[in-house]
Amino acid sequence: MKTVYEWKSGFAEAAQNYISLKQQTGLKFEIQERYLRHFDTFYYRNGFEGTMLTKEIVNDFIYDPNERPVSHHNKEVLMRDFGIYLADRGHHAYVTEVKTKLPRCKFVPHIFTDDETRRMFKAIDNYPQSQRSYRNAVDPVLFRFLYGTGVRISEALNLVLNDVNVESGIATIRAAKNMKDRLIPMADSLTKRIVNFMNIFHRYNDSKMWLFPSCHNGTIGQMDKSTAYNHFRDYLLMADIPHTAIGPRIHSFRHGFAVKCLKKWVLDENDLTVLLPYLSAYMGHSDFRATQYYLRLTSDLYPEIVRRVEAEFGYVIPEGGIIYEES
């Protein structure tokens, strides 16, 4: 049985109200709640009373020498926002800065070449018929959906039939990674395939049925990520595409989608400063860091493109790497 945390410091009521407020907006706020519990315990055990949030107290809590920089960073973000919340409600509260620099990610994802993409989908389409699963009907549509939209695998697997408007060609991703809904327009060719898939495979299914279900031992339900990944590895083997430490992974479809968008925009001489916010919103990024990551990746993969437009767009592509937030 899960133990219920007992709040005990002078900030107990304010912290719980703050958590409740954030959760009411649709945020899970689980990690932040855990840090606030740590702060509650820290404040109480050190004999602090009342609700005065001083700089010394905040810094002592944040910069525990036994913790890693990522914890310091997360605490800075939380205590800055909590401090603003308290100050807005009349409390004496120090609002800290977010200043901890985290190590930059050096991971370079696999981007499918055009030839690898053709071989991959040939393998998916020609996988031996299986009488005990839905993979022959579901996987060709699922992986084309991932390739053609750039959504996360979890977002695709959470879709139900009612989330796809075949008339407008738009899929609705609900309460995704950053707890935000967003609309995903599909290419006409993908929409037609989805329509055909729904008319045949889902002909008698309820609108709340999973769009990409699985069947295991006769039980129909939501496909889990591990099943999708195991299928993906089968197709890589059939397509003779080596799997190494850097992939390919299912997420490679998402990486490739973003990079191809940026490559096309650069070649078309579009203004990236105008288009980047659209890509960020489309991909469901919480901020521009991950979007900037794709800019850097594009410049590394296609240096000739960057040379062509460096004078005009060079300032857009940040120096060095960024903290990569995707998973």
Image: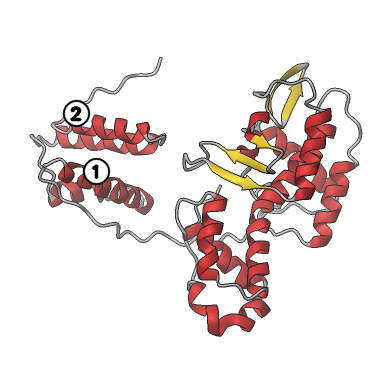
Q: Disc 2 marks which amino acid?
A: Glu
Q: Residue furthest front?
A: 167
Please identify the quarter of the rendering in which residue 168 is found. top right
Disc 1 marks which residue? Answer: 82
Q: Residues within 10 Å of mark 1 (few under 14, many from 20)?
A: many
Give the residue drawn at x 67%, y 49%: 149
Q: In the depicted view, which residue is nearer to us: 56 or 12?
A: 12
Under tag 1, what secondary structure? Answer: helix
Disc 2 marks which residue? Answer: 13
Tell me if label 1 and label 2 are in contact, CB under 8 Å: no
Q: In the depicted view, which residue is nearer to us: 184 or 178?
A: 184
Direction from residue 264 to residue 28 in the image, left or right: left
Residue 227's place in the image compared with 2, above or below, is: below
CA separation, marks 1 and 2?
Answer: 13 Å
Please identify the quarter of the rendering in which residue 106 is found. bottom right
Residue 103 placement (x, y as % from top left):
43, 60
Under tag 2, what secondary structure? Answer: helix
Direction from residue 261 to residue 179 in the image, left or right: left
Residue 313's place in the image compared with 168, above or below, is: below
- Look at the image and tell me whether residue 1 can be seen: yes
Give the residue drawn at x 84%, y 60%: 115
Q: Disc 1 marks which amino acid?
A: Phe
Q: In the depicted view, which residue is nearer to us: 42 or 33?
A: 33
Residue 117 placement (x, y as % from top left):
80, 55
| Sequence-first disc among 1 and 2 | 2
Direction from residue 27 to residue 238 in the image, left or right: right
